[in-house]
Structures are given as structure tokens and as C-alpha cells.
């Protein structure tokens, strides 16, 4: 069962039915016990009434024919009375018992025999099964003036009226709880369908994305699904950017090969071709192909930045500073302490980006280089909203009107005498793959300050708890 709604509905309805069933059983048992207790409470006053009309005459008990309970005088009334002495000998029977079946009288006599063994001033209430199903109550007393002072008053009533009452209650309980179960189950299904509506909306939007009717998922109301929608939109945007970069790489490759191919075609048709020129064009084509393949491979390598491992920023910066200290021994290289941070990025890409900018800072700066790390605000999931790496020098810097040109894709500044725009376009492209950003400002040291912003960062101290 792959449907979340069906799973939740099945579990919820099962729990609901189990709860209602147990509640119904508890209520039915409680009612049954209350009925049985009520029978005992009904029989006790009748026994007291029999005791009230009993009179001692010549060592035995005599009963008036005018009994307070009319059912004791009616045949088949379902209420029977018996009075026995201490030896179990019947002393008096109610008219209803006298006119009853002999088997029923024998059943009541057996119950009375068992009740006489109970000490006096004690009551015995128990069901009796046999010819008929009865509830019987026995009350043993000591009656002064009798030859046998121990007297047992036994009163029995038919169980059938009470069973019918319990059966009616049971049927009413089943009907009521059954209707309640259906109503609650239907309401529960409606609530589940309403609660899972945002998931169905996301599914519908994903189908529209597959068909090309949407470019991104629309925001949903529940806060719990907002991170999911945001992550999916980021992934969709990332995939779209990758496709555009692949398309641009292929366009660049085809455009770059046009001129060498034209030279080769014209040279091949010449009667005396310039072999040196043709070899130069072949080498140029090979270099173009290698360059574009390297760019495509790099894009494919960083295609899923979220699948990259976590790289220590402090370790990479320290490694580059040690290498630059050997290459530029006259420079003052400093790193501002800001704790160890980790980036989700391929380590070679981080080395390329930082190494390019830091080497340019040493090459075109005077004698000072400062590297610092600035952390963004915490997002609540252990990650940061952004991590910035500042690389500052004391060189001439980059003029404000040349910043956009320096960051433009495909523009190189190797031949410029001033500025440090060498390779910044490559750094910008790599940062864009990781949803990062590159900015160039003026440093407090007097030169340029290159700011590299990364999105997925975390403190190294939390790495163990996030793995």
C-alpha cells in the first residue's frame, strides 16, 4: 500500500474502531453488572417484607395469605419464595412456587440446601441454572422461639426479563456505536483528504512540470512542506542552469571551431598548402576541444553540489597560504581567525577558486594579503544562510567600471598591466554552479577585496551531529 492517505485512513479507522469496540464492551459489562446488582436490591426488600408478615406460633413460623408482593401469589409470575429451617426442611412455600413445576421447585430446594450451610445473618446471592435460569437471594437469620431458630429465607426470580433488558441495551449500543463509527470514519476520511490536499497539489504541479506547463512549484500553505517545495525549486533551477551551461559550452565549441575549420578547408583546396599554418590550426582545434571538454567535465563533476562532501575551509586556506609563502616570501600573508567552517563543495573546485584569487592578490598586490571568513545567520538546521570568504590585498585594485567586464564569461585579463581580473570569470562560473556569488569591492588595505559567497556551510563542531 503505497498511498499515504490510505495508510493513514486504515490506521486511523482501525484505532477508532478498536477504541469504540472496547468502550462498547466496557459499557455493556457495566450495564450488565448494574442489572445484576439491581436484581439483588429488588429481592432484598421482598425478603424483609416476608420477615415482616411472618409470625411465630407454637415453635414454627406462620405466614399471612395477604402478602405484600402480589407476584408471590400468582402462578408463572417468575417470583418464588421458600422458607427453610436449620435442617433444610422447607417450612413455607409461596403460592407461586406451590403451583410451579416440580423440577423448578426441586431446583430452588437445592439452592436453599446450599444456603442453609452459610452462617446466620449472612446473605447469598447467586444465579441458579437447571430447569430455569434464576437469580436467587438467601438470607439466614436466628429467630427466637422456634424449635429450630436458624431460618433461611430464599427468594428466586426468573432471569428472562433482565436478559431481555440487557439484550435490548446491547442492540442499542451496537446500533449507536455502529452509526457513530460510520460517521466518525467518514469525517476522518474527509479530514485526511483535506489535510493531504497540499501533497496532491504538489503532485499535480510536478506533472505540470513534466509536461512543461510550469517552470517552478508554487508555494503551499503548510509550513511543514515549505522546505520541500523550496528544495525542489532549487533543484529545478539548478538543473535548468546546468542545461543552459551545457548548451552554452556546445555553442562555444561550435563557434570556436568555425574559424580553424574555414582555414583548414581553404588550405586543403590550395595547390601549395601552408603545412605549418594547417598544423597550427589543428593544434588550435585540439586546444579548443580540450578546453571545452574540461569545462563540461567540471560542470558534470559539480552537477549535484548537494552530493559533495564537506571540506574544511581553514585547511584549504592554510594549504594555499603555505604554498604562496614559498612563492612570494616577501609578502605578508595573514588569515583572520574565525573558527573552522566546512563547505559542501568539491575540494579541487575550492582550491581552484581560492588559489586563483589569492595568487592574483599576491601577483598584483604590493606586499600584504588578508584572508578572512564571515559567517551568515543560522538557518535552524545546523547550516548557515551563507559563508563569505574575503580576500584583500594592498595593490591598485580593480576600477569600478571594469568590475562587470572582469566578471563577464569568456573575458580574460592576462595581458592587462594593472588590476587583478585574471581568472575571475572562471571563479564566477564555478561559484554559480554551487549557487554562490562573487563580488569585488575596495579593501581597507587599499587594494581590491574579492568576496566569495557560498550557500551551504556549517561549523566544523556540528559535523558529527549532522552526519
Image (tube, grey):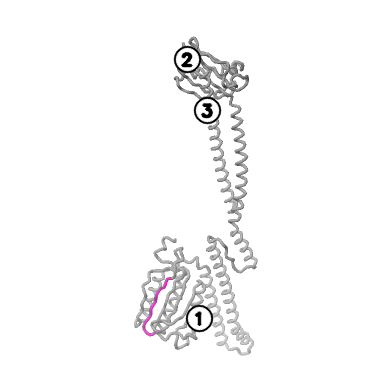
Nearer the viewer's eye, disc 2 or disc 1? Answer: 2
Q: Residue furthest top?
A: 58
Q: Which residue is mark 1?
A: 407
Q: Residue at x 63, y 89 (%)?
A: 270
Give the spatial CA distance, label 2 vs label 1: 118 Å
Q: Which residues are magenta?
A: 365-375
Tags 1 and 3 touching, CB below 8 Å: no
Q: Which residue is mark 3?
A: 41
Q: Which residue is mark 2?
A: 86
Q: Nearer the viewer, residue 466 or 384?
A: 384
Q: Position of residue 73 (x, y in %)?
A: 60, 19
Q: Residue at x 53, y 81 (%)?
A: 410
Of callouts 2 and 3, the N-terminal one: 3
User: Could you tell me which secondary element the residue under label 1 belongs to?
Assistant: loop
Q: Give the quarter of the figure containing the C terminus.
A: bottom left
User: On the rendered structure, is 384 left or right of 238?
Assistant: left
Above or below, 398 relative to 102? below
Amino acid at each position: 500500500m503505497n498511498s499515504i492517505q490510505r495508510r493513514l485512513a486504515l490506521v486511523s479507522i482501525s484505532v477508532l474502531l478498536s477504541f469504540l469496540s472496547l468502550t462498547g464492551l466496557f459499557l455493556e459489562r457495566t450495564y450488565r453488572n448494574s442489572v445484576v446488582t439491581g436484581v439483588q436490591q429488588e429481592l432484598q426488600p421482598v425478603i424483609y417484607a416476608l420477615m415482616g408478615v411472618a409470625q411465630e406460633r407454637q415453635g414454627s413460623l406462620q405466614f399471612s395469605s395477604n402478602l405484600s408482593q402480589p407476584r408471590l401469589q400468582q402462578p408463572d409470575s417468575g417470583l418464588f419464595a421458600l422458607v427453610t429451617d436449620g435442617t433444610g426442611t422447607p417450612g413455607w412455600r409461596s403460592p407461586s412456587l406451590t403451583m410451579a413445576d416440580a423440577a423448578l421447585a426441586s431446583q430452588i430446594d437445592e439452592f436453599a440446601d446450599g444456603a442453609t450451610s452459610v452462617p446466620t445473618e449472612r446473605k447469598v446471592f447467586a444465579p441458579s441454572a437447571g430447569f430455569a435460569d434464576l437469580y436467587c437471594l438467601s438470607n439466614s437469620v436466628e429467630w427466637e422461639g422456634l424449635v429450630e431458630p436458624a431460618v433461611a429465607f430464599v427468594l428466586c426470580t426468573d432471569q428472562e426479563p433482565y436478559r431481555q433488558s440487557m439484550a435490548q441495551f446491547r442492540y442499542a449500543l451496537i446500533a449507536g456505536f455502529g452509526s457513530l463509527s460510520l460517521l466518525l470514519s467518514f469525517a476522518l476520511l474527509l479530514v485526511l483528504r483535506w489535510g493531504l490536499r497540499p501533497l496532491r497539489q504538489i503532485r499535480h504541479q510536478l506533472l505540470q512540470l513534466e509536461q512543461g506547463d510550469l517552470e517552478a512549484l508554487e508555494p503551499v500553505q503548510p509550513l511543514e512542506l515549505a522546505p520541500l517545495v523550496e528544495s525542489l525549486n532549487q533543484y529545478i533551477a539548478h538543473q535548468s542552469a546546468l542545461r543552459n551551461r551545457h548548451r552554452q559550452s556546445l555553442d562555444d565549441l561550435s563557434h570556436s571551431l568555425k574559424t580553424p575549420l574555414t582555414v583548414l578547408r581553404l588550405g586543403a583546396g590550395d595547390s601549395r598548402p601552408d603545412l605549418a599554418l594547417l598544423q597550427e590550426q589543428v593544434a588550435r582545434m585540439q586546444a579548443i576541444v580540450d578546453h571545452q571538454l574540461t569545462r563540461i567535465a567540471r560542470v558534470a563533476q559539480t552537477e549535484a553540489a548537494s552530493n559533495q562532501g564537506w571540506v574544511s575551509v581553514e585547511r584549504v586556506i592554510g594549504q594555499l597560504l603555505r604554498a604562496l609563502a614559498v612563492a612570494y616570501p616577501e609578502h605578508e600573508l595573514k588569515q583572520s581567525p574565525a573558527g573552522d567552517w566546512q563547505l559542501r563543495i568539491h575540494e579541487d573546485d575550492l582550491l581552484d577558486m581560492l588559489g586563483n584569487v589569492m595568487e592574483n592578490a599576491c601577483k598584483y598586490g604590493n606586499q600584504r594579503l588578508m584572508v578572512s571568513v564571515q559567517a551568515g545567520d543560522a538557518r535552524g538546521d545546523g547550516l548557515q544562510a551563507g559563508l563569505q570568504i574575503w580576500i584583500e590585498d594592498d595593490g591598485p585594485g580593480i576600477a569600478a567600471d571594469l568590475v562587470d567586464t572582469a566578471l563577464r564569461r569568456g573575458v580574460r585579463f592576462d595581458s592587462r598591466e594593472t588590476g587583478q581580473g585574471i581568472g575571475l570569470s572562471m571563479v564566477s562560473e564555478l561559484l554559480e554552479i554551487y549557487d554562490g556569488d562573487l563580488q569585488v569591492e575596495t579593501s581597507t588595505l587599499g587594494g581590491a577585496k574579492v568576496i566569495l559567497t557560498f550557500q551551504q556551510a556549517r561549523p566544523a563542531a556540528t559535523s558529527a551531529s549532522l552526519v
